[in-house]
Image (cartoon, rainbow, N blue to C red):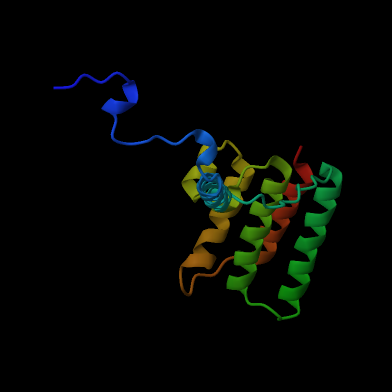
Amino acid sequence: MRLATNLQDYFTVDLQGPQSYSIVPIIITVLVLFASFVALLFIYLVKKAKQRPKKVFVPKKVKLPLPVLKEKYLYMTTELEDRFRAGKIDEKFAYEELSSLTRHFVFDATDVKVQNYSLEEIARMGMPGLNELIKECYPPEFKPGEKGDILASLDHARRIVAQWN
């Protein structure tokens, strides 16, 4: 057995120096990885943007001063009475509109959504005049054939609006 005198005799493969490799495959690999990263980032950001709730412009409600509100609703009550007296609406519809009109007045004056309240909920609010008026409106509004005195109820509504503070 012969001993190698040179280290190269032990290796069967000749190694190439780093200058002999082509850099093109490395650049292509880096570019593909970078493009993949950018594409995934773009997809992620698009999905996230779609999930984000859209900002909707909601105009702020302009709250009218109480004297202006009173004038507005007194006028609307008078207009309702005129339509009833002219025979343009029947008593049931007049009661429905009076109830709605009064509830909306209270909402505009207090920001309490009384238009969504039942009679019991209105009674618990501590507004006896409103409770009595809505109670007057219920039978003609909901019971078929039930009659009421719409003109007296309109006067009652006017007193509630006029005395509101």
Residue 64 sits above or below residue 125 on the image = below
Tell which residue pokes out farthest to the left in this image.
Answer: 1
Residue 149 shows in the view: no
**Residue 15 at x, y percent in the picture:** 40, 34
Q: Tell me what residue is drawn at x 58 percent, y 49 percent.
A: 49
Q: Is the residue 85 above or below the residue 161 in the image?
A: below
The location of residue 149, given as percent across then percent down, is: 62, 65
Q: Quadrant of residue 99?
A: bottom right
The C terminus appears in which quarter of the rendering?
A: top right
134, above or below 65, in the image: below
Q: Position of residue 125 (x, y in %)?
A: 56, 37
In the image, 93 versus 7, the foreground residue is 7
Residue 77 point in image, percent of width and height: 75, 61
Residue at the location (64% across, 69% down)? 94
Q: Tell me if 68 is positioned left or right of 8 in this view.
A: right
What is the number of callouts on the image? 0
| Outermost residue to the front | 2
Q: Is residue 70 left or right of residue 139?
A: right
| Nearer the observer, 76 or 14 | 14
Q: Is residue 108 left or right of residue 33?
A: right
Instruction: Decide which of 155, 80 is in the foreground and name it.
Output: 80
Q: Residue furthest bottom?
A: 87
Q: Which is nearer the eye, 58 or 105?
A: 58
Question: Dividing the image into 4 quarters, which one contains the N terminus?
Answer: top left
Q: From where the camera sits, is residue 126 visible?
A: yes
Q: Residue at x 58, y 71 (%)?
A: 92
